[in-house]
Image (cartoon, grey):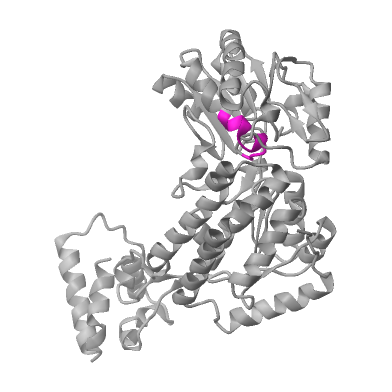
Amino acid sequence: MPLTYTNTAEYSQIIDDLRKSFTNNLTKSLSYRKRQLRQLCKLLEENEDEICDALYKDLRRPKTETMSGEISWCIKESLDAIEYLDDWSKPEYVKVGIAHKLNGCHIRREPAGTVLIIGTWNYPVLLLLAPFIGAISAGCTVILKPSEVPENTSATLTKLISKYLDQNAYRVVNGSSEETMELLQLRFDHIFYTGSGRVGRIIMTEAAKHLTPVTLELGGKSPAIVAKDVDISIVARRLIWGKTFNCGQTCVAPDYIVCERSVQEALVKEFPRVIKEFLGENPQKSKDYSRIINQKQFDRLNNMLKKTNGKIVYGGITDRNELYISPTIVSDVTEDDELMQYEIFGPIFPIMVVNDLEEALEFISSRDIPLAIYPFSASDKTIQYILDNTRSGAAVINDCLMQASVMTLPFGGQGHSGMGSYRGKGSYDVFTHERSVMNTPYFCERFIGFRYPPYTQRNDRIVNWLFFSRWKGRSLFRGVLGAVIVLFLAYYSHKAEKLVGYVKNYFS
């Protein structure tokens, strides 16, 4: 299916229309948001085969990986949002001191406004729709910009979103980097981007012109740290699965391995056996092995292989016509090797030998903060030492990739690997403004005169006692006195209907 680019002359009108819908409160009601989330579930469930076919054309990805890596996750996140939206959205009454017991202080969660979500090509469904679910849940109006690289998938999503979801609130625009730059010249209330650090810097620069907040989900070189005490057969299976899933084109894929020489020797023996178990004698003929997205990415990876000074101990087979690169193990890689300079984002697995754990951690800490680290060890003490002496967006112990499947864990990086996090309620929070609300009833006026000029020492003492005294726990005296004050003022105000609310706020 051909991908048709949106005319850039239409961008301003599209955004104006979405802002008008937001101003008119189209997306504010929870019933509307839930209805749109149900429509998104319906879109995915009724068109599962069409979406899988599109992804097969773009990445030759097996249906199992598309379902487990994209579609099923989006359905689950949508259903969770529908179930928990009432709880997420209700006002949160905060703890206050005695001076504010009658102010009804709470946090009101409101949608950020009209937002832009820019997807990427390696998981073009999940990485567009997962933040979109958060934006719908929050009550925003949304412009979705899919990646132009997986043309079939982006064209399919564009068609289906316009069919299933309300176009007065959610619009899809398509285009290349030039069209995206035109889009970034316009003002949004939040921009959510998934992709490379290079483009992330551009987006952050353009957003700064409008003081627009951004969430950047980037990547980086996520290391696997393999200690000497591991079960090599288990570690090899988990690492090869993580590295070959979607042909290594995963932002949280293990990028390289650091280990001692004896561990490298054991892995070099075990990896080929595992690859044959998973993908057969010839992975190129396996129906369970994806392809590189396009020739540009293929050439980039192929050049890495040509320039490496490491030893290719398994694989290294390429076929440009098929965009095929075999699972490839490269041993004895040094820190200045071509494979260690940039995120690989493909099925090439370099191994760097170190003398001990301290050297491994020193090397990792000297580089940009990765999106994830994967420590493998049977020792809790070793694991704790690794966690205490590294930084990363996430850490998965004795496994890889699986942190992304837990929707109650925040997904995001630090520094070069990203800014902000999302998933589950975190996605809702990204697109929500926490509005502080307090109310000072008129009947309180005669009791707050001490705050007005002319200032006196007596009034200063009252202010200090009410606002700045440090109460150590809730003493019986304080509790009784405060309750009496609340009841008296509520009665005195002749607003009996607020009595329950006052008492509730006092004991919150």
Q: Which of 356 and 15 lies nearest the eye of the viewer?
A: 15
Which quarter shows the N terminus? bottom right
- Is residue 499 within the magenta segment? no
183 relative to 64 in the view: left or right: right
Query: Residue at coordinates 46% horizontally, 13% vertically from top-left?
Result: 229
Q: Please tell me whether residue 445 is drawn above or below residue 394 in the rendered image.
A: below
Residue 491, quarter of picture: bottom left
Q: Main secondary structure of the magenta part?
A: helix
| Res 427 visible | yes
Query: Residue at coordinates 74% horizontally, 66% vertically from top-left?
Result: 173
Which quarter shows the C terminus? bottom left
Q: Please tell me whether residue 226 is drawn above or below residue 55 in the rendered image.
A: above
Number of numbered labels in the structure image: 0
User: Start and end of the magenta stretch?
Assistant: 241-251
Residue 305, quarter of picture: top right
Q: Which of 408 and 39 lies nearest the eye of the viewer?
A: 39
Query: Residue at coordinates 31% horizontally, 57% vertically from top-left?
Result: 470
Q: Please tell me whether residue 67 is drawn above or below residue 497 in the rendered image.
A: above
Where does the image place residue 200, in percent across and percent down from the top left? 72, 50
159 relative to 132 in the view: left or right: right
Residue 12, quarter of picture: bottom right
| Res 189 visible | no
Q: Which of 67 and 427 lies nearest the eye of the viewer?
A: 67
- Is residue 243 within the magenta segment? yes
Where does the image place residue 325, in percent across and percent down from the top left? 74, 29
Where does the image place residue 263, in percent across and percent down from the top left? 56, 12
- Which residue appears farthest toward the bottom when viewing the image? 494
Where does the image place residue 493, in percent across and percent down from the top left? 25, 89
